Amino acid sequence: MIRLRQYKSCDAAIIASWVKDEDIFLKWGGSRFGAFPISADIIDQKYRHNNGDCAEPDNFYPWTAIDDDNKAVGHFIMRYTGGDNRQLRFGWVIVDGAMRGKGYGKQMLLQGLNYAFCILGAERVTIGVFENNDSARWCYKKTGFTETELVKSEPWNVTEMEITKNAYFDQILNK
């Protein structure tokens, strides 16, 4: 079992090591973060203000998933994408390679959705999956996301997926 907690600076090094091991970030991550491999300093700088608070606290939420031993096993971010704060986007979803296949990704996403819909009041959550990442697509579908459109882009095409608040609660009530 895992739980989510807000990102802390001490998470940056482990996140950087996971990203370094992911081929998918070789092309995508370097342009987004200005360098590859992405260092702990770059991650922490992107996530925190100079005063040490999480970056953009009203619309940017970096989360770390930890296990029962308080060991980091995954990470993702969520941010508002609509001006009315009813739509959130999950991004940079990553699970420690040694922990894959244990359901941590699904648990992490379900807890994030619960927070998005029950605490933040979102009406819709979106996520993108690269065309060559079938395991992520499978995990997102198991969590309740449905495919909405294919976005052709470089270096890979991205399938946009979404889940609405109603679909999320229908899924929970029908278990």
Image (cartoon, grey):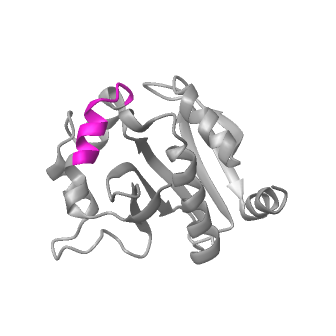
**Rendering coords of residue 101 (x, y %):** 51, 34
Answer with left or right where residue 160 lies relative to residue 169: left
**Magenta region includes residue 20:** yes
Is residue 166 depicted above or below 22 in this figure? below
**Magenta stretch, main secondary structure class:** helix
**Rendering coords of residue 171 (x, y %):** 78, 56
Please name whichever residue, 132 or 17, is drawn nearer the observer in this view of the structure: 17
* Residue extending furthest toward the front: 69
Is residue 20 depicted above or below 119 in this figure? above
Which residue is drawn at the image coordinates 37% and 74% (left, top)? 57
**Rendering coords of residue 89 (x, y %):** 54, 56
Magenta part of the protein: which range?
14-24
**Magenta region includes residue 126:** no
Please name whichever residue, 150 or 45, is drawn nearer the observer in this view of the structure: 45
Residue 159 visible, this orientation: no
Which residue is drawn at the image coordinates 30% and 70% (left, top)? 54
Which residue is drawn at the image coordinates 34% and 32% (left, top)? 25
Which quadrant of the figure has residue 170? Answer: bottom right
Is residue 146 depicted above or below 70 in this figure? above
* Residue extending furthest toward the right: 174
**Rendering coords of residue 70 (x, y %):** 33, 59
